Image (cartoon, rainbow, N blue to C red):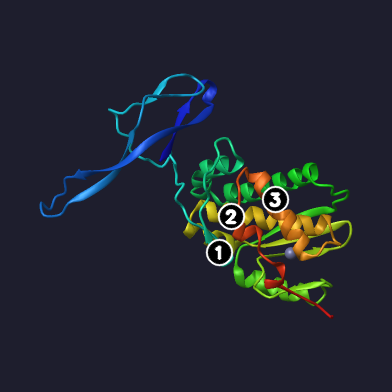
Amino acid sequence: MVVFTKVVLEKKQVHWNRVPVNKIFIEQNTPEPKVKAYIPMYQPLQISKCEKCRKVIAEPKELIRILKEAVKLNEEEMIVMDKLVFKLDKIPEGSRLEEYVKKLPKIMNGSKAEILSFLNNTFVECLEFLKQNTDIVYLPTITLKLIPAHEQFKREEQRESKKAISKEVAKAPVHAFVVGNRFQKRLYIDLEFFIDLLKFGYLSFIINLVHTYIHEILHIGFPQKYEQEIHDLECSLVEAFLGIELPKEIKNLKASDYYSQKNL
Ligand SMILES: [Zn+2]
């Protein structure tokens, strides 16, 4: 496995390095002699140098204790999406997913403002990515509405769905929806749903969030497309955006399992 260690460079710049390690458990003394405690430590497999400053940052004889600042990248982590559970073959080095996974622990333990700015920035990144990588010709101004509580989100959704004129109706609970006119849209996000995904890990959280952002932006950019077309496009864009390959089970999902045609 791999852990990340932080090196502070000149001018307080920070560089995260990957260090290949083995996880081991070290016995700890406790006040009660019959009770044994073990703490996880990480033994570097080789001498590692910082990619930026070439300083030695890890060597096998010095065990690494994971503190808050060092982040474990768990490639065994199960990812939960809709009713599917899957594992990624790998999180490619230098991918956007890797970048997110590295910075998320700090953000999620930070202030509310940090979390909200991450959610907003990620949305803008998705938006810019779609503008550059699809043939969307026109996008209205989109305001992101992060609704903190699920109940409040449901109330907003019920209120808005009375006015909505969607071709297809979701069978399962929705976690995001869009309202507005040709020039201005509001994207509502059920924040509690996404925050709740953190219990499965950062991967589930970020992959679901990006999927939802991209899905909804595609609906706005391609108002004529049906759910199935959106879904197919969305999967390849999520892959390109995060730099990963999604399992076939996700890519082969049929929109008809999730949506039914309205007024037909
Ligand atoms: Zn949709």
Give the x, y percent position of residue 25: 26, 44
User: Would you say 15 lies left or right of 228 here?
Assistant: left
Label number found at residue 236? 3
Q: Tell me residue 215's x, y (percent).
A: 72, 58
Secondary structure beneath dot 1 equals strand
Image quadrant containing the N terminus: top left
Q: Earlier in the sequence, mark 2 or mark 3?
A: 3
Instruction: Kindly report the distance in space between the C-alpha atoms of the residues bearing marks 1 and 2.
Output: 10 Å
Residue at mark 2 to residue at mark 3: CA–CA distance:
11 Å
Query: Which amino acid type is marked by label 3?
Result: Ser
- Image-based side of 137 in relation to 40, left or right: right
Residue 144 is at least partly visible in this image: no
Q: Are marks 1 and 2 in contact (CB under 8 Å)?
A: yes
What residue appears at the point 85 percent right and 53 percent down from the top-left corner? 140
Residue at 84 percent across and 49 percent down: it is 136
Q: Which mark is residue 146?
A: none
Q: Which mark is residue 84?
A: 1
Q: Quadrant of ligand 1?
A: bottom right
